[in-house]
Structures are given as structure tokens and as C-alpha cells.
Image (cartoon, grey):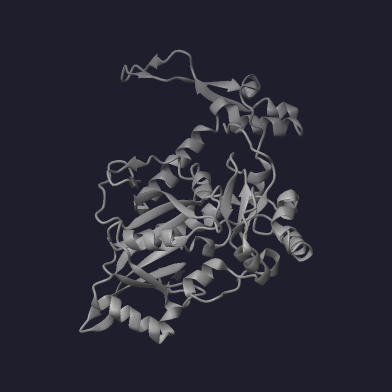
């Protein structure tokens, strides 16, 4: 039976706009206002070394994250992958995938910068001095890369493909590659009303925007609906199982899934609340029971969050948990442990069956009385065959058990998450 959790202040709020914190507290300075006025993305701009505009459509322009209480406490939910394009994520993924020390300082640049002669000269110089050098491709910085489809496998594109460069005969050479997937969240509805409020507020109060916005936080929640949690897991699970396996290829250094703390928390039920094992180096491992630890790990999970309380802007990204894992572990927890727990809840405290009975009462009361649940008898019995003590079950009319549960049928959120997109 699902238990009710304590909820914070209700409402969903745009929490970061053009990279800068606006909820629960507005953190602003001259650069923040300049970014918001010019619709500049500070993360794409920092990665490429040149000013880049936000790539989102007008209805969601500038929205990086949304603050919700879907997990109970208020948390940021990432809605733009470029928000996580930070040194903490990218350089951290490089260190884990390519076996570099935690104190190493790899040089990482987007592939789009390789057209610049000064960048190419700099890379050659770094390689000649023995520095680790990497470049990466993504949709807006060099273009996405993918594994083409075959007769027996689908095409799979990668969010970010990281390429290791080495020096061979004094010339740059492509070595291994790694995969970085950044998990964002789908939301019901759109943010168009909140975005309109922000744009109008900035236009009408250019000299006092931060103060005015802090006094009118309701602007940030108008029309903003909650995250589609189940859809995020459904569209991600198979892809991650597939991509985690690619780390077993000699040329692939592995895959990192960078996932916000809010999404990781929401996935706990989908993954059967997996058990993480603390490792001596400060990381954690996630394996199926009895399975040996692979060396090296083919996959990593980075659980991260932005520091909403920081006085600086943009809010710093913090990697909170680093988890080594593989595809069999994901399969075990999601496809064995979680379904087993769901099966036990069909008649546990008459949860599912009580909901069925309540629904039937409204349309055929006599039929509702025939709904029964099998429950353990008070006294176990011995079978003649084995003389072992076994739990004996008995059938009990559901009406006698209904008061034991608070389950009254699917929640509104569960129904909406099961609808097709746009439903």
C-alpha cells in the first residue's frame, strides 16, 4: 500500500531562468540580468567560449529547472541538458570513464571548437607535454553521434560522445570514446504562462527585476504542472540498459548516466529501492546479488543537484553520489525486485482488491461482495507429505478487509502518467 508522505508548500515553480536562480530566492547580479535580457545561455557560452543563445522554443525559453514537491520535499527537476554541462559533470565523467585520477586535470573542449586553428595548436601542445586531452560531440556542439541500426538492433544516438585523443607519430590520433547521458524530466503541460510573466516582469522592471520577482513568486508557478515521472523512466530504461552494455567493447570506455537527485529519488520505486554498497574510494556500487564486481566498470551513475542555497549564480552543480553499475544490475532491480514488490501489494492489506471492490459497489453491489483475498491463516499447518510447517491461506471476503487500507484506486498522477503524450 502506498503511504502518504508529508508535502511541502504546494505548487510548481520555474526555479532557474537563463541559468540563474529565481526560486525560492532570487540570486541576481549584473551578468544574470544581462543573460536574461539577451536570452543568453551561460552554459553553452562557457563551453564554446563564445556567446550562445538559449536553444529552447518560445514557450519554454530560458527555463533550466522547475521546483516541485513530487517526491515530498521541494527539489529542482532538470528540464534542459545544457544546465548540467558543467566541469563537475563533464570532467568527472572523463575521469571515471578513462581511469584518470580524481586530482587529474584533463583538457576537454567541444568538437565545434576544433575548427579553430588556435585550439588545434593548443591541443597538439598539450598532447606533446603528456596532458590528457578530450573532445566531445553533442547536438549543438559538433552534432550528435549514433550507432547505426542493423537488421537486429536499432539506431541509438548519444547525448554526449566523449573522444580521447592521443599522440601517434607526433600527430593527433583518436583513441577510445565514452558516452555521457544527461537525464532531463518531461513535464505535463508547458511553462508558457510563467515564461510570459518573467519576460513581462523584466521588461516592466528592468532596474529592480530581482526585488520585484522576489516579491511576486507566484509569477513563476502560473500554469506550471508537475513532472511525468513514469514517462521519464519508461523512455530511459531500455536506452540505458543498451548503452551500459557498450562499455564492454574495447574501443568504448563506458557510459555515464548523469541524473538529477530528484529523478533518482523518483526512480527508487521503479528500481525496487536498490541497495548501494559503499566502496573505500568514496563511490558506491550497484550490483545484482552474487554477481562479481566488473573491472573496469562499464557504467557509472552520477547523482547530482544544484546548490540552491549558494549565494553565487549560476548555482553550482554538486555530484552527490557516484555509483558503479552494469546492465544486469539494472535488470535485476527493475525487472525482478520491483515487480515482486508490486505482486505482494495486490492483496496486501487488500490494497488493489479493495479498490476493485469499491469500484464495483457503485455499479453492481452484489458482485462486489464476491471479491475475496487470500490471506495467511493465523496458524500454519503441517502437510502430510513433507511434515514441514507451511503457511496456510484462507479466502476472506474483501468487505472484511477494506478498512485496513487507505488505497482507493489510481492517483490522478498515476492515471496521467499512463496516458499517451498529450493525453
Task: Identify whether 331 is placed above or below 20.
Answer: above
Q: Please identify the residue farthest to the top as the structure is shown.
A: 379
Quadrant position of residue 353: top right
For the point 41% across and 57% down, which residue is it? 241
Left or right, 68 with respect to 198, comes to left
For the point 50% across and 70% down, which residue is it? 46
Q: Quadrant of the C terminus?
A: bottom right
Q: Please identify the residue farthest to the bottom as the structure is shown.
A: 117
Total numbered circles: 0
For the point 71% across and 34% down, which residue is it? 359
Task: Identify whether 66 is placed above or below 155.
Answer: above
The answer to whether residue 148 is seen in the rendering is no
Q: Which residue is more in the foreground, 86 or 69?
A: 86
Left or right, 296 with respect to 378, comes to left
Percent x, y of residue 397: 62, 22
Left or right, 170 with respect to 14, comes to left
Percent x, y of residue 90: 41, 63
Percent x, y of residue 208: 73, 59
Quadrant position of residue 39: bottom right
Task: Identify whether 311 is placed above or below 85.
Answer: above
The answer to whether residue 107 is seen in the rendering is yes
Q: Which residue is more in the foreground, 44 or 390?
A: 44
Percent x, y of residue 165: 30, 75
Q: Quadrant of the N terminus?
A: top right
Amino acid at each position: 500500500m502506498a503511504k502518504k508522505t508529508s508535502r511541502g508548500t504546494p505548487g510548481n515553480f520555474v526555479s532557474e531562468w537563463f541559468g540563474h536562480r529565481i526560486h525560492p530566492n532570487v540570486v541576481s547580479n549584473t551578468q544574470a540580468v544581462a543573460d536574461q535580457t539577451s536570452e543568453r545561455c551561460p552554459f553553452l557560452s562557457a563551453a564554446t567560449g563564445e556567446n550562445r543563445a538559449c536553444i529552447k522554443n518560445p514557450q519554454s525559453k530560458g527555463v533550466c529547472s522547475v521546483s516541485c514537491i513530487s517526491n515530498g520535499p521541494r527539489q529542482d527537476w532538470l528540464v534542459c541538458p545544457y544546465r548540467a554541462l558543467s566541469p563537475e559533470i563533464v570532467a568527472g565523467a572523463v575521469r571515471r570513464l578513462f581511469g584518470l585520477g580524481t586530482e587529474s586535470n584533463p583538457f576537454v573542449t567541444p568538437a565545434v571548437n576544433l575548427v579553430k586553428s588556435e585550439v588545434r595548436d593548443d591541443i597538439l601542445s598539450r598532447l606533446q607535454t603528456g596532458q590528457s586531452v578530450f573532445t566531445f560531440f553533442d547536438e549543438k556542439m559538433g552534432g550528435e553521434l549514433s550507432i547505426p541500426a542493423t537488421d537486429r538492433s536499432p539506431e541509438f544516438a548519444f547525448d554526449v560522445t566523449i573522444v580521447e585523443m592521443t599522440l601517434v607519430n607526433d600527430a593527433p590520433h583518436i583513441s577510445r570514446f565514452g558516452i555521457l547521458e544527461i537525464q532531463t524530466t518531461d513535464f505535463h503541460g508547458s511553462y508558457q504562462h510563467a515564461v510570459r510573466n518573467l519576460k513581462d516582469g523584466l521588461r516592466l522592471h528592468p532596474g529592480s527585476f530581482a526585488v520585484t520577482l522576489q516579491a511576486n513568486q507566484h509569477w513563476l508557478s502560473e500554469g506550471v504542472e508537475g513532472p511525468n515521472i513514469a514517462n521519464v523512466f519508461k523512455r530511459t530504461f531500455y536506452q540505458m540498459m543498451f548503452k551500459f552494455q557498450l562499455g564492454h567493447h574495447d574501443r568504448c570506455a563506458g557510459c555515464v548516466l548523469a541524473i538529477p537527485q530528484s529523478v533518482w529519488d523518483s526512480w527508487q520505486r521503479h528500481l525496487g529501492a536498490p541497495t548501494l554498497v559503499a566502496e573505500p574510494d568514496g563511490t558506491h556500487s550497484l550490483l545484482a546479488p552474487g554477481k562479481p564486481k566488473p573491472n573496469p566498470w562499464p557504467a557509472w551513475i552520477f547523482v547530482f543537484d544544484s546548490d540552491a542555497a549558494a549565494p553565487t549564480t549560476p548555482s553550482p552543480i554538486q555530484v552527490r553520489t557516484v555509483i558503479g553499475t552494469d546492465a544486469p544490475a539494472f535488470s535485476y532491480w527493475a525487472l525482478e525486485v520491483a515487480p515482486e514488490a508490486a505482486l505482494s501489494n495486490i492483496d496486501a492489506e487488500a490494497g488493489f482488491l479493495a479498490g476493485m471492490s469499491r469500484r464495483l459497489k457503485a455499479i453492481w453491489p452484489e458482485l462486489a461482495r464476491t471479491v475475496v483475498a487470500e490471506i495467511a491463516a493465523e496458524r500454519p499447518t503441517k502437510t502430510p507429505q513433507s511434515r514441514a510447517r507451511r503457511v496456510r491461506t484462507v479466502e476472506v471476503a474483501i468487505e472484511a478487509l477494506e478498512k485496513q487500507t487507505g488505497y482507493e484506486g489510481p492517483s490522478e498522477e498515476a492515471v496521467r502518467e499512463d496516458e499517451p503524450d498529450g493525453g
